[in-house]
């Protein structure tokens, strides 16, 4: 946690898992986007995130094995991604609010890590674009029609409870977590405010003491997602693709 | 046809401000004949026809039909492959597949853009697709049952598409030809990744090899059908060739494709499911067996394994997205109204997000004015659809 | 409220030192989104360093009929082009 701590060997794992799982969820949009231009945009973001995951996993190769072993052969409880990124896509508003919450976290996080984590320095520019994409859409959906406003507010309210764990310290990451949270809070309040959306006053944590994603405790949809993702790879042990 | 020959006003650059592309209202028979002669001469001289040139109604209609069908094929074609994005067996393959499916959306966009230069909006074309009144390539009505199908689509389906498309880069209609140049350039990786995917399977475990062979067995014949009916039955071929929209006959391209594939299959260590495939010394081509055209017609008529599924999903995506498109349009209208209002400071005026990536920075740059056409300058290339550029630079 | 997004023409500067060139068109609800869509669509293989988007309806084009008189003056002044002049073989950097 101090500035002298080098990135611990496993510190990159939760970040890699965040990126992989969110990329996978965005990949589920292929062929379903509301307009062709968004097919291209969502795929761009998914590809950026997948690239980040692969780079982060590669740094863990000595400890955990190849990127595919890390992605395909771990059980659900061994994944350390936050619960936010594993939440099902829902409608376009739900996906975009999830994007907003996550990219508003990921960008300053990577900015802080830029000096200690090589990937972060490169990825911070990508993430800035993801954040911009999410903000632009939040403004349009919040302000657009009654329906889009209602859908977006509903998603803000529903996903709010998954935002608290984002700021739980990850061992080995040289991050000023309190600053990060403050920055996130200010950023989100500004965008929601501009979009005419209310900031929920509900809790940002679940009440369960077992913890959350960073402890390998996930939500029910995650198991099914992993089953789909890993099935083919696991059906052919040792095969190369 | 009338719907495609009347471009909506302002639909397109300059459209509606000058003489319409098609026969100008009230053109005398002599004028019409002169326009036709000029058009014929331009096509014969391998010049490109550009959007605001006069063109025969039937040429325009043929192009709209063909480009639309091509665009629809790109976006329907996303589905069979997207079916495997969430199950791709390695992260490398997952990235490749996502990039490929994304390209298909992009190619659809380029092609709808080309169709719009003819005065037909994307929305209109999508409506026709959704209503089943315009077709897409029949090949996408076949299912992707295993991971190897992703490889077979890349190698065979994209291979056939490229064989078809490369000549279209020289199509007489400029915007279509330009879109095809871009598409062909981007597609070069599509076929290769499919081939490489199959090669890995073929050289992999027994189960993987069997998976690859099974996929090739199922995709080979439908791929040959992609070149369309035999020349003697092809309804539009002759005229399209005369117009230089099309450069080679269906059978010619099909033969070219078979000749290319046979040695490639051998290198893969896979067989093609045609016992009649043999080298013909006289013709210096591979002979191949009879194609089941009844299957082709059946699938085309809607009775393929996935016709309903593909169209249903496409419609659902469009309908589910309607509220999003409406919301963005509503926001844009509100913003415009706010800007026009005497008192600024609306809730979302000048929606500047707190942070903005460097490459999108909108620091006020010196507006760059593109050179105005000046009589003393050398004449630019004919650019009737390409306006004088004038704009504000928006990036670093 | 029509949900049809207007059409925009996209111009891409492929690298510094070159002017923006027409790349194609796309739909977007407003200029900001048009720029972003253009970035995603036309520069996803690093094809550009700068973008312009222009509402298609805002473009005034010369019609083919006007083309001849419009551009004719240049055609009769071949001496404005470097290829007009003969240069002895072997002379470089001219």
Image (cartoon, rainbow, N blue to C red):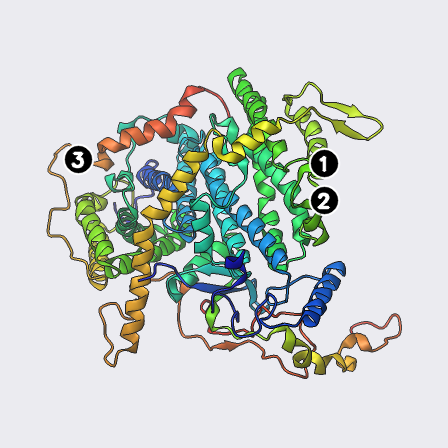
Reading the image, the residue beneath label 3 is A211
Under circle 2, the secondary element is loop
**Residue B373, picture quadrant:** bottom right
Reading the image, the residue beneath label 2 is B248
Marks 1, 3: nearer the viewer: 1
Label 1, label 3: how far apart the Cα atoms are: 62 Å
Taking depth in this image into account, of B241 and C19 the one nearest to the observer is B241
Picture layout, residue A36 above or below residue A79: below
Residue contact at pointers 2 and 1, CB within 8 angstroms:
yes
Taking depth in this image into account, of B9 and B347 the one nearest to the observer is B9
Kindly indicate whether the residues beneath marks 2 and 1 are on one polypeptide chain: yes
Reading the image, the residue beneath label 1 is B256
Label 2, label 1: how far apart the Cα atoms are: 10 Å
On the picture, is B121 further left or further right than B48?
left
Under circle 3, the secondary element is loop
Q: Chain of mark 2?
A: B
Q: Chain of mark 1?
A: B
Q: Chain of mark 3?
A: A
Under circle 1, the secondary element is helix
């Amino acid at each position: 946690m101090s500035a002298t701590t080098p990135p611990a060997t496993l510190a990159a794992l939760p970040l890699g898992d965040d990126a992989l799982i969110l990329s996978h969820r965005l990949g589920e949009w292929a062929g379903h986007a509301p307009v062709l231009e968004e097919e291209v945009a969502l795929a761009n973001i998914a590809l950026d995130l997948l690239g980040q995951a692969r780079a982060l996993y590669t740094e863990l190769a000595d400890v955990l094995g190849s990127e595919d072993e890390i992605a395909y052969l771990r059980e659900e409880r061994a994944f350390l991604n936050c619960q936010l990124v594993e939440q099902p896509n829902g409608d376009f508003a739900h996906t975009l609010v999830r994007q907003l919450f996550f990219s508003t976290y990921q960008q300053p996080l990577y900015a802080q890590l830029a000096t200690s984590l090589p990937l972060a320095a490169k990825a911070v520019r990508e993430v800035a674009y993801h954040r911009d994409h999410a903000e632009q859409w939040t403004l349009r959906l919040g302000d657009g029609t009654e329906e889009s406003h209602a859908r977006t507010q509903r998603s803000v309210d529903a996903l709010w409870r998954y935002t608290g764990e984002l700021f739980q310290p990850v061992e080995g990451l040289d991050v000023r977590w309190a600053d990060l949270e403050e920055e996130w809070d200010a950023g989100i309040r500004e965008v929601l405010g501009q979009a005419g959306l209310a900031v929920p006053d509900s809790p940002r944590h679940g009440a369960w003491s077992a913890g959350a994603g960073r402890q390998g405790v996930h939500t029910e949809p995650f198991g099914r997602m992993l089953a789909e993702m890993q099935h083919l790879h696991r059906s052919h042990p040792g095969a190369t693709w | 046809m009338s719907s495609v020959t009347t471009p909506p006003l302002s639909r397109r650059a300059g459209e509606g401000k000058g003489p319409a592309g098609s026969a100008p209202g009230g053109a005398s028979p002599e004028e019409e004949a002169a326009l036709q002669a000029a058009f014929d001469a331009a096509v014969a001289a391998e010049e490109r026809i550009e959007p605001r040139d006069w063109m025969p109604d039937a040429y325009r209609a043929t192009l709209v039909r063909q480009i639309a069908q091509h665009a629809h094929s790109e976006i329907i074609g996303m589905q069979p492959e997207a079916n495997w994005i969430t199950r791709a067996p390695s992260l490398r393959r997952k990235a490749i597949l996502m990039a490929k499916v994304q390209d298909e959306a992009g190619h659809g966009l380029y092609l709808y853009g080309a169709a719009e230069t003819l005065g037909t909006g994307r929305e209109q074309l999508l409506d026709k697709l959704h209503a089943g009144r315009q077709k897409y390539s029949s090949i996408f009505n076949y299912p992707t049952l295993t991971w190897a199908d992703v490889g077979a689509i890349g190698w065979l389906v994209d291979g056939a598409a490229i064989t078809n498309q490369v000549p279209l880069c020289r199509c007489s209609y400029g915007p279509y030809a330009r879109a095809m140049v871009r598409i062909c350039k981007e597609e070069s990786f599509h076929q290769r990744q499919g081939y490489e995917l199959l090669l890995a399977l073929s050289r992999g475990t027994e189960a993987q090899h069997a998976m690859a062979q099974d996929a090739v067995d199922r995709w080979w014949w439908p791929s040959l059908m992609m070149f369309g009916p035999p020349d003697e039955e092809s309804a539009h071929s002759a005229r399209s060739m005369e117009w230089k929209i099309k450069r080679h006959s269906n059978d010619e391209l099909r033969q070219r494709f078979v000749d290319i594939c046979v040695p490639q299959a051998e290198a893969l260590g896979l067989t093609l499911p045609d016992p009649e495939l043999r080298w013909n010394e006289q013709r210096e081509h591979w002979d191949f067996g009879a194609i089941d055209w009844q299957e082709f017609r059946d699938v085309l008529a809607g009775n393929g394994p996935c016709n309903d599924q593909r169209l249903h999903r496409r419609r659902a995506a469009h309908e589910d997205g309607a509220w999003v498109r409406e919301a963005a349009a509503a926001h844009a209208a509100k913003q415009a109204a706010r800007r026009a209002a005497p008192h600024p400071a609306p809730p979302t005026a000048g929606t500047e997000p707190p942070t903005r990536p460097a490459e999108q920075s909108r620091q006020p740059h010196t507006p760059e004015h593109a050179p105005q056409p000046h009589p003393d300058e050398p004449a630019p290339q004919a650019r009737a659809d390409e306006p004088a550029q004038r704009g504000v630079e928006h990036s670093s | 409220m029509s949900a049809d997004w207007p059409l925009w023409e996209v111009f891409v500067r492929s690298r510094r030192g070159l002017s923006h060139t027409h790349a194609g068109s796309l739909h977007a609800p407003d200029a900001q989104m048009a720029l972003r869509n253009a970035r995603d669509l036309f520069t996803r293989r690093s094809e550009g360093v700068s973008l312009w988007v222009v509402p298609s309806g805002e473009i005034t084009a010369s019609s083919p009929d006007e083309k001849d008189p419009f551009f004719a003056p240049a055609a009769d002044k071949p001496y404005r082009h470097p290829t007009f002049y003969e240069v002895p073989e072997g002379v470089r950097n001219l």
